[in-house]
Image: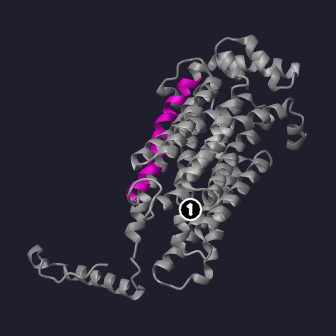
Amino acid sequence: MTEVNKVDDEPGKYRQLLVALIANIATISLGTMIGWQSPIIPQLQTENPPVGVRPMTDEEASWVIGITCISAAFTSLTVGTIANKFGRKVTGCLMSLPLCGCWLFTIFATEHVHLYIARFFSGISGGMVLFLVPMYVSEIASDGIRGMLGSLLVFILNGGILLAYVIGTILSYRSFAIAMLILPLFYIASFVFVPETPVYLIRRNRIDEATRSLMWFRGGHVPTVEREILRLKQEINVSEQTIKLSDLFRDRATIKGLFITLGLFAGQQMAGIFIMISYTETIFKMSGSSLSPNDSAIIVGAIQVFGSYLSTILVERAGRRPLLLTSCLGMGICHYTIGVFCYLKTLQYDVSQFSWISILALSIFMISYGLGMGPGPYIVSSEILNRDVSNVVITMGIFTAWGMAFVIVKLFPTIVDLLETKGQPRQLILDRLNGISNVLDKTKYVSSNDIKTIPKPELI
């Protein structure tokens, strides 16, 4: 039987899809919070910003983004404990609070510190959404469609980012935030009616409720429900044992799963995706694109959604490994292309007729990310890890991803500033660098007192 036929034969697949979409309303809300940064931060750095009495500096802007990463990282360490204690459904309902809090502080912000608080709430939302939604979906999904439903996370997250790019060009600062507040309100109004996952109910020894939940998710298909209840009981009996740090290194399979998970989550952010999303308009300004930064960001956002849509189609057909390898190769080539293009522009070469290259490269980057490294870490980690250690390891992976994102976000403005040539002609830059080189040559075998008498070259 082909993979397509297996998916078609899954009992209750439409109910599972419906509930997965409801859970992912929180994901699209998170996407708008992440996408908010690209169109709004340039507004905050204008002479008449919508918040505050002066333009926001690059350092302050990096903290607006970085605070999201910090709070998300530490939230990811606690959300698993909350979900295990109070249930996936209750935790999912609580998730609406920081989602709403972010937009409320954004709406009523009058100073930069209010935006820091808003982004703190967005980070809590990120830590909860990117942990709880994959957990909830994986625990309700049949084996044959788990990969497809899991890949919806990145597809819908990218849809939220695109929505923010579009709305950011249409609405004012506060109108944008008011419109986005509708999403978490709609989410809580819908999610409150979904069933609890059978996995959590069995963990709490509520077998009858677990059976009813699974009957609903499997469309009343009794043989499937009986088989899954038996399997879940066996798996959960094993996973109920207290996990020690040494259990993560108990055998080669677990060690391999640990390093694959941490490597995938770290690689996801080391690829630069959070920078690409948060500074999309800034990157296009740096590259000298002939299109406006807003239009370029929308084009790239739409292509990013297309790439993640391809992933939902191919994930059960092409396999995880080929998609991940293709994704990494594509992103690497695009990074190299954008880097060479910006370097030539920095050296004052005329690259105006090739400005389309930056849009093309960033678009292919987004497609490549959506194909593999976007959904890949969540899907692969849930499949290669034993259920008794999966929550701990995935928590470590998500913490690693957000921590890596913070480091990269904070380094980005600094690196850009270090590479800034301040509009000096290429020949002048090379002459200055040559002057520094000559000074270094003259200091060879010279005492420290004599070095002080050597004329210093003028710096840019």
Q: Quadrant of the N terminus?
A: top right
Helix, strand or loop under label 1:
helix
Residue 51 spot, x, y in % from top left: 45, 53
Looking at the image, residue 429 sits to the left or right of residue 129; the answer is left
Q: Which residues are magenta?
A: 58-83
At x 65% / y 49%, what residue is drawn? 160
Looking at the image, residue 374 sits to the left or right of residue 104; the answer is right
Q: Quadrant of the C terminus?
A: bottom left
Q: Is residue 271 visible?
A: no
At x 51% / y 31%, what residue is drawn? 249
Q: Would you say the magenta stretch is mainly helix, strand or loop? A: helix
Say if the magenta span includes residue 218. no
Extreme left residue here?
449
Residue 378 spot, x, y in % from top left: 64, 41
Q: Closer to the camera, 280 or 265? A: 280
Say if the magenta span includes residue 73. yes
Q: Residues within 10 Å of mark 1 (few under 14, many from 20)?
A: many
Q: Closer to the camera, 296 or 314? A: 296
Q: Is residue 7 visible?
A: yes
In the rendered image, the vertical position of residue 459 relative to residue 46, given as above or below: below
At x 45% / y 50%, what residue is drawn? 64
